[in-house]
Amino acid sequence: MSDAITLSSSTQFHNQTLALLVAYQQAPSVRLRNRIVELNMGLVRRVAHRFSQRTPVPYEDLQQLGSLGLIRAIERFNPQHGCAFSSFAIPYIRGEMLHYLRDHSHLIRIPRRWQSLQRQGHRIQEQLTTQLGRTPTHLEIAAHMGIEPEMWEEARTSLQQTPLSLDATVPSPQGESLSTLGEQLPDQKDLDLQLAELERMQLQRALTQLEQQTCQILKAIFLEDQTRKQAAAFLGVSPMTITRRVQRGISQLQGLLQS
């Protein structure tokens, strides 16, 4: 019974928001926009809470940034596209916060565990280079650290700066629509914050030139916040294959963007 009530309430909320959005599209006004903002502030609070747990930026400031993203989403939303407004708005809310954090990168917290693993890995890399007379592979480094290769890969790449655009557009798996990379970035991983600016159209064209599975893997890891093991299970390949395809995909993107 409670599930039915919850579903009914959710449907009513969706219909009310949609009706206001349709009215706003037909005759924009500050009153209508503010009403839509009030109805959907829960989205802003949810995202702000999650960001406040991983940055020293005050919750109130994050909420203000998120509100700007929500207004931006209201201005750009087209009810005729059939997309749920919450799904459309959250990337804009998150995007405002990510842009702020990108511009104030000294505020970003890299997990201490990753920092510790990276320092340990670099020491082992130097030792193995001396012992082997060559640069050790990442598999060898992980083995000497006593951790899974995927964990070393996460730690190793966490502080790298990969120049991809937060404003770049990527296709959906069905190729039916485009959404921006920065808007969809998951806010749980610090890997998100490695993405800096490049031209939107350049990256869009580059992504369309990647092999379909590589594009799916990049989206699963960077946009859907899946771990390498989750992505591997979903696609029916090994986690190491996922790691290699991620590295190859990023390398291909960089090559395409520089060509």
Image (cartoon, grey):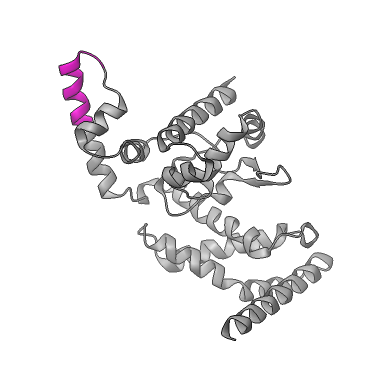
Q: Which residues are magenta?
A: 122-134
Considering the whole magenta stretch, tell me its main secondary structure.
Answer: helix
Q: Is residue 179 left or right of residue 48?
A: right
At x 80% / y 60%, what residue is drawn?
Answer: 80
Q: Is residue 221 left or right of residue 257?
A: left
Q: Is residue 108 left or right of residue 93?
A: left
Residue 147 shows up from this direction: yes
Whether the magenta-drawn stretch holds residue 124 is answered as yes
Q: Quarter-wise, where is residue 49 in the image? A: bottom left
At x 63% / y 82%, what residue is drawn?
Answer: 4
Tell me where residue 109 appears, x and y as whole percent. Answer: 34, 51
Tell me where residue 179 appears, x and y as whole percent. Answer: 65, 47
Q: Quarter-wise, where is residue 50 in the image? A: bottom left
Tell me where residue 174 appears, x and y as whole percent. Answer: 70, 44
Residue extending furthest bottom?
Answer: 1
Nearest the camera: 150 or 22? 150
At x 54% / y 22%, what residue is drawn?
Answer: 255
